[in-house]
Image (cartoon, rainbow, N blue to C red):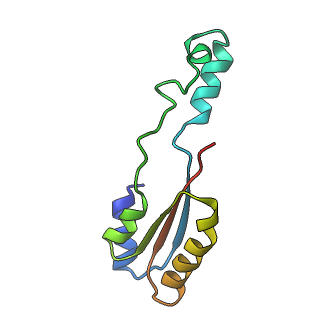
Amino acid sequence: ANPAACHHAMAMHDIPVLTVICANRKWTAVQGSALGMYPAGHAADAGQLSPLAELGPAVAFEQYAAASGGYGEAVTECRDLVPALGRALHAVQAEHRQAVVNVSCQD
């Protein structure tokens, strides 16, 4: 679905939903298929993700919620996840707003 339209609809209909996004910025299925089909091919020798598997640059998904009056927060460090979830739950439960926590999951 279109994130902008979904967040707009949640704001319009007063639907306080918490969404946690695990953003790894790669399409592992595409990379795995390329390596499986061509184990000695370009993708295997490149030492990085093949161009069709790379989903960068990172998208600030949390800003969709903020643009519609909700709460949005990006998390890049593990130690920041629990406090961010607490703030997002507060926005949903106490403020009755939608919230998005966009978690960067790089390996």
Residue 49 location, x and y as percent?
54, 27
Q: Residue furthest left?
A: 67
Image position of 2 with respect to 26: above or below: below
Quarter occupied by residue 80: bottom right
Residue 30 location, x and y as percent?
57, 29
Image position of 74 with respect to 66: above or below: above
Quarter occupied by residue 98: bottom left
Q: Residue at x 41, y 82 (%)?
A: 14
Q: Quadrant of the N terminus?
A: bottom left
Q: Residue at x 63, y 65 (%)?
A: 79
| Count of marks, rendered view | 0
Image position of 105 with respect to 72: above or below: above
**Towards the viewer: 20 or 17:** 20
Q: Residue at x 36, y 63 (%)?
A: 64
**Towards the viewer: 36 or 2:** 36
In the figure, is residue 61 to the left or right of 44? left
In the figure, is residue 73 to the left or right of 86? left
Residue 69 location, x and y as percent?
34, 77
Q: Residue furthest top?
A: 40
**Towards the viewer: 86 or 3:** 86
Residue 88 location, x and y as percent?
52, 76
**Towards the viewer: 42 or 98:** 42
Q: Residue at x 64, y 42 (%)?
A: 107
